C-alpha cells in the first residue's frame, strides 16, 4: 500500500471522527468564549457596584430562553423579544436589589446621559448608574447571539456579541485579553459553523487556521480608539501610574492603590491666603477594591458654584504655578475662580473645578471657597436625613465585603451614638493602631480590608481608603479626596507646596452642613518623612526644591502656619482627636507623601523635570534592576504565556497559508532541486539524481517533449548547441548511471554518489550569487 493511500485513509477516518456534530459543538464553544469576553467586563462593574448574581442569572436565563424559542419564533420576533429582554433586565435588577420600578423613572435622565457619554469614551465604572445600565445592556446581545446560533445562523450570531464587545472596547473597559478572547470566539463560531453547515472536513482546517491568524493580527493592530483625555479609550492598560505625582492624563478619573513610593521635593505651586487649608484637587466616590473612580461627567464652569448648606466662612487666595500644573488646587467647596484657566474650566459632578489645559510656570488664578463653620456639637446633632443623591452615591462598597471587616468596624464604632462620633472613633483607631510607612507591598484583593485586618503600616492612601469604607459599612456617606496638605509657611500669608505635600484624606457628609474633612493618617511619622526628604534634597542640591521665599527657611524652624482647623472658628471638626485628648483640635500636618495611587494631578500634572532625579515620575522604588540571579531564568519568567499563544497562532496561520496556496509544495520541490536528501537504495538515488537534472535543464533550456525519450532529449540539446562539450559529457554520465539503475543490472553506491555529486555541482552553478561564487 502506498503512502498516498495511507494518507487518504487517515483523512477519511478523521473526517468520520470530526464530523458536523463536532464542528457544531466547537462553534457553540466559540460563542461561549465570545459571550464570556464581554460578560467578564460587565462583571468587573457589578462586583464594584453590586448585582453580579443578577448578571449571571440574566445571562443564563437568556441562553436558556434563546435555545427554547429558537424552534418557536422567527428572527424578527426574536429581535423584538431582545428589546423586551433589555427592559426586563433593568426591571430584574431593580427588583433583585429591592428597589421599586419607580426608581427607573427618576434615574432615567442619568441613564440617558451616561449612555451618551459612553460614546465619547467614558468608562463604565465612571457612570453614575453603572449597575442599572450594565444589567440592562446584557440581555439583548446574549439572547440574540444564542438564538441565531441555535438556528445555525453562525455568521449572524456573532454580530450582537461582537457589537457588545466592540462597544466595551471603545469605552476602554475591555482590555487586550477579553478582546482577544472574544475575537477568537467569534472566528471559531463562523469557521466551525460554516464547516458544519457545508459538511466540511478536516482537510479544510488550514483555512480555519488562516482566518484565526488574520483575526488576531487585526485585533492586535487596533490598539487605540477615539476618546478624550478624560476618558481613555484604548485596549489594555498603558502607562499605569506608580506614584501620586507621576500620574498621566490617562489616569484622570481613576486612582489605583499601589505599593511603595518615594517623595518628590519639587515645588508645585505657591498660595497667598490668609487662611491655611488642605488644597483639594480631586474627589472620588466609587471604590472597586483596588482603585478609586470618580463617577459622572463634567460641565462647563459658568462663573460660580453653589456654597455648602448651613453656616460657613469665606476663604480667598491666589495660587501660582511653579511648574507645569494640571489641576486647580483650592480649599474644599470652591465658590468661584478667576484668572488663567478659569474661562475654560470644567466642574465635576462632585463640585471640583478642573482646567481643560495645563497651567504653566508663572500662571496664577484667584479662588474663593466656603469653609464649613460647624462645631462638634452641631455635627453630633446633624442626624442621618441624607439627600437621596448623597445616600445612593457615597455609601457604595464592593461586593463580597467580609464579615470580619464589618465586625471590626462595628467594634471600633460600638460607643458611637451618631455619625460624627463614628467618624471620630474610626479616625482615632486608624491613627493609633497603624504605623506610617512609604515602603509597603500592595495587597491583593480588597485594599481596605487588608489594611484594617492584616497590615501594620501604610501611607495616606491606605488610611483614607480604609476610613471611607469603614464609614460606608456603617451607612455613613463618605468620599475619598486627594490634593495637597497646607505646605511650608514662608510668610504670614504665603505657603510653598511641594510634591511631597501630596495627600489623601476623607470627607464625611453631615445634613445641614455638607462635606467635612477628616484625616486618619498619623502625623508625626509623616512629618519626619517630609522633613528628612527635604533636608536630603537641599543638601544634595536637587533642582526646583525651593522658591526665593523658602530657600532660607531651615527645616527645623519651619512653621506649617496657622491651623486650618483651629478652634477659633476654623473647622474644628476636620481634625478631631481621639476622645479624651487634651487637644481635640490638633492641626492637620502639612508634610506628606507622594503616593502610588490617587493623583492630585489627575488632569495630568507632570513634574517640571521628569528626569532620574525625580523618582516619583519614574515610579522608582529604590530597588536595583538586577538582583544578580542571572539573566536566563529571569528572561523565561518574564515571558507572557499570552504572547506565546498569540505567536504560535500567528505562526500556525502562516504555515496554513503556505499549505493552502501550495507554497509548501513549491518550497519542497525547490529544496529537492538543490538538495538530494537522505540516501538509501543506490538505484533509486541514481534515478532521482537524473530527475533533478532534467528539472535543471528544463528551467535553463527547455522541458522534454512528451514523446521524446530521455536519451533523445539530451542529444537534441547537444545538436541545438544549447550545451557545450564539457556539460554534455557530464549529462551523459548521469544519464548512463540512471539507465543502468532502471533498465540494467543496477549501480553501485559509489556510482550513485558520483551522479548525485554531478547534479549537485550543476545545481550550485546555476544558483544566483552562489553560482558565481561556486565558479
Image: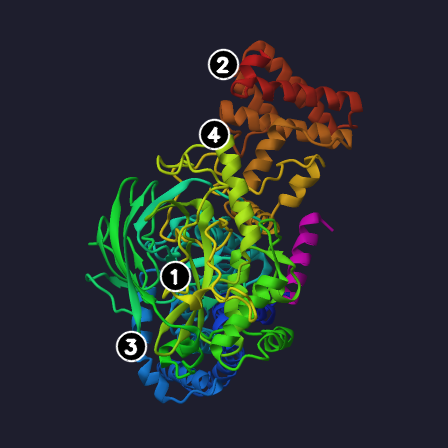
Of circles 3 and 2, which is in front?
Answer: 3
- Determine crowd level at label 2: few under 14, some 14-19, many 20+ residues with C-alpha closer than 10 A: few
Which sits in the foreground, 548 or 325? Answer: 548
First in sequence: mark 2 vs mark 4: 4
Residue tagged by mark 2?
A: 721
Q: CA distance from mark 3 to mark 2?
A: 92 Å
At 74% from the left edge and 22% from the top edge, which residue is drawn? 753
First in sequence: mark 3 vs mark 1: 3
Q: CA distance from mark 3 to mark 1?
A: 20 Å
Residue 352 on the magenta segment: no
Pointer 2 and pointer 4: residues touching (CB < 8 Å)?
no
Residue tagged by mark 3?
A: 109
Looking at the rendering, the stretch of residues picked out in magenta corresponds to 1-17
Residue tagged by mark 1?
A: 171
Residue tagged by mark 4?
A: 541
Residue 15 on the magenta segment: yes
Of circles 1 and 4, which is in front?
Answer: 4
Pointer 3 and pointer 2: residues touching (CB < 8 Å)?
no
Residue 691 location (% of width, % of height): 62, 30
First in sequence: mark 3 vs mark 2: 3
Q: CA distance from mark 1 to mark 4?
A: 45 Å
Amino acid at each position: 500500500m502506498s503512502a498516498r493511500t495511507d494518507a487518504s485513509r487517515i483523512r477519511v477516518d478523521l473526517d468520520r471522527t470530526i464530523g458536523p456534530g463536532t464542528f457544531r459543538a466547537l462553534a457553540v464553544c466559540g460563542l461561549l468564549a465570545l459571550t464570556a469576553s464581554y460578560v467578564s467586563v460587565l462583571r468587573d462593574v457589578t462586583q464594584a457596584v453590586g448585582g453580579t448574581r443578577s448578571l449571571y442569572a440574566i445571562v443564563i436565563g437568556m441562553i436558556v430562553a434563546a435555545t427554547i424559542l429558537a424552534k418557536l419564533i422567527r428572527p424578527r420576533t426574536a429581535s423584538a423579544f431582545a428589546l423586551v429582554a433589555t427592559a426586563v433586565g433593568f426591571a430584574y435588577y431593580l427588583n433583585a436589589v429591592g428597589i421599586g420600578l419607580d426608581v427607573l423613572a427618576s434615574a432615567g435622565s442619568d441613564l440617558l446621559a451616561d449612555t451618551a457619554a459612553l460614546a465619547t469614551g467614558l468608562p463604565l465604572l465612571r457612570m453614575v448608574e453603572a449597575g442599572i445600565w450594565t444589567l440592562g445592556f446584557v440581555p439583548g446581545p446574549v439572547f440574540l447571539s444564542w438564538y441565531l446560533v441555535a438556528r445555525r445562523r453562525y455568521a449572524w450570531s456573532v454580530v450582537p456579541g461582537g457589537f457588545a464587545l466592540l462597544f466595551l472596547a471603545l469605552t476602554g473597559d475591555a482590555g487586550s485579553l477579553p478582546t482577544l478572547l472574544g475575537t477568537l470566539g467569534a472566528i471559531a463560531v463562523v469557521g466551525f459553523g460554516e464547516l458544519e453547515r457545508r459538511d466540511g472536513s478536516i482537510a479544510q482546517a488550514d483555512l480555519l487556521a488562516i482566518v484565526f491568524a488574520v483575526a488576531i493580527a487585526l485585533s492586535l493592530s487596533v490598539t487605540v480608539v477615539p476618546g478624550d483625555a478624560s476618558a481613555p479609550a484604548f485596549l489594555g492598560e498603558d502607562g499605569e501610574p506608580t506614584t501620586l505625582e507621576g500620574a498621566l492624563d490617562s489616569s484622570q478619573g481613576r486612582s489605583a492603590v499601589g505599593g511603595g513610593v518615594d517623595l518628590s521635593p519639587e515645588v508645585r505651586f505657591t498660595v497667598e491666603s490668609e487662611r491655611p487649608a488642605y488644597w483639594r484637587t480631586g474627589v472620588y466616590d466609587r471604590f472597586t477594591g483596588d482603585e478609586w473612580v470618580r463617577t459622572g461627567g463634567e460641565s462647563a464652569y459658568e462663573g460660580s458654584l453653589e456654597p455648602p448648606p448651613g453656616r460657613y466662612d469665606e476663604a480667598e487666595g491666589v495660587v501660582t504655578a511653579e511648574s507645569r500644573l494640571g489641576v486647580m488646587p483650592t480649599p474644599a467647596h470652591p465658590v468661584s475662580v478667576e484668572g488663567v484657566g478659569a474661562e475654560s474650566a470644567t466642574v465635576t459632578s462632585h463640585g471640583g473645578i478642573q482646567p481643560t489645559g495645563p497651567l504653566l510656570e508663572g500662571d496664577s488664578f484667584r479662588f474663593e471657597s466656603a469653609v464649613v463653620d460647624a462645631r462638634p456639637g452641631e455635627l453630633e446633632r446633624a442626624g442621618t436625613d441624607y439627600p437621596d443623591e448623597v445616600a445612593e452615591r457615597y455609601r457604595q462598597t464592593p461586593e463580597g465585603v467580609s464579615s470580619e471587616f464589618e465586625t471590626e468596624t462595628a467594634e471600633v464604632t460600638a460607643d458611637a451614638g451618631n455619625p460624627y462620633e463614628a467618624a471620630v472613633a474610626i479616625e482615632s483607631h486608624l491613627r493609633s493602631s497603624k504605623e506610617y510607612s512609604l515602603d509597603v507591598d500592595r495587597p491583593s484583593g480588597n485594599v481596605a480590608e487588608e489594611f484594617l485586618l492584616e497590615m501594620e503600616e501604610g501611607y495616606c492612601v491606605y488610611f483614607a481608603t480604609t476610613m471611607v469604607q469603614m464609614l460606608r459599612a456603617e451607612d455613613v456617606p463618605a468620599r475619598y479626596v486627594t490634593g495637597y496638605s497646607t505646605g511650608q509657611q514662608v510668610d504670614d500669608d504665603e505657603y510653598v507646596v511641594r510634591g511631597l505635600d501630596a495627600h489623601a484624606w476623607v470627607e464625611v457628609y453631615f445634613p445641614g452642613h455638607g462635606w467635612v474633612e477628616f484625616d486618619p493618617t498619623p502625623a508625626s511619622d509623616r512629618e519626619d518623612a517630609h522633613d528628612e526628604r527635604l533636608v536630603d534634597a537641599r543638601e544634595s542640591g536637587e533642582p526646583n526644591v525651593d522658591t526665593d521665599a523658602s530657600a532660607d527657611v531651615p527645616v527645623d524652624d519651619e512653621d506649617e502656619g496657622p491651623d486650618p482647623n483651629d478652634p477659633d472658628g476654623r473647622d474644628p471638626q476636620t481634625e478631631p482627636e481621639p476622645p479624651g485628648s487634651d487637644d481635640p483640635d490638633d492641626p492637620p500636618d502639612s508634610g506628606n507623601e507622594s503616593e502610588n495611587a490617587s493623583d492630585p494631578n489627575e488632569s495630568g500634572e507632570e513634574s517640571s523635570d521628569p528626569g532620574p532625579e525625580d523618582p516619583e515620575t519614574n515610579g522608582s522604588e529604590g530597588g536595583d534592576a538586577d538582583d544578580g540571579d542571572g539573566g536566563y531564568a529571569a528572561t523565561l519568567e518574564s515571558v507572557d504565556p499570552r504572547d506565546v499563544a498569540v505567536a504560535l497562532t500567528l505562526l500556525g496561520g502562516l504555515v496554513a497559508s503556505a499549505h493552502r496556496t501550495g507554497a509548501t509544495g513549491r518550497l519542497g520541490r525547490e529544496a529537492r532541486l538543490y538538495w538530494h536528501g537522505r540516501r538509501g537504495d543506490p538505484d533509486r538515488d541514481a534515478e532521482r539524481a537524473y530527475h533533478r537534472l532534467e528539472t535543471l535543464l528544463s528551467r535553463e533550456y527547455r522541458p522534454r517533449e512528451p514523446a521524446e525519450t530521455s536519451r533523445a532529449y539530451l542529444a537534441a540539446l547537444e545538436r541545438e548547441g544549447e550545451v557545450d562539450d564539457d556539460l554534455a559529457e557530464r549529462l551523459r554520465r548521469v544519464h548512463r548511471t540512471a539507465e543502468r539503475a532502471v533498465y540494467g543490472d543496477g549501480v553501485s553506491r559509489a556510482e550513485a554518489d558520483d551522479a548525485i555529486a554531478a547534479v549537485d555541482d550543476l545545481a550550485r552553478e546555476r544558483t544566483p550569487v552562489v553560482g558565481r561564487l561556486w565558479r
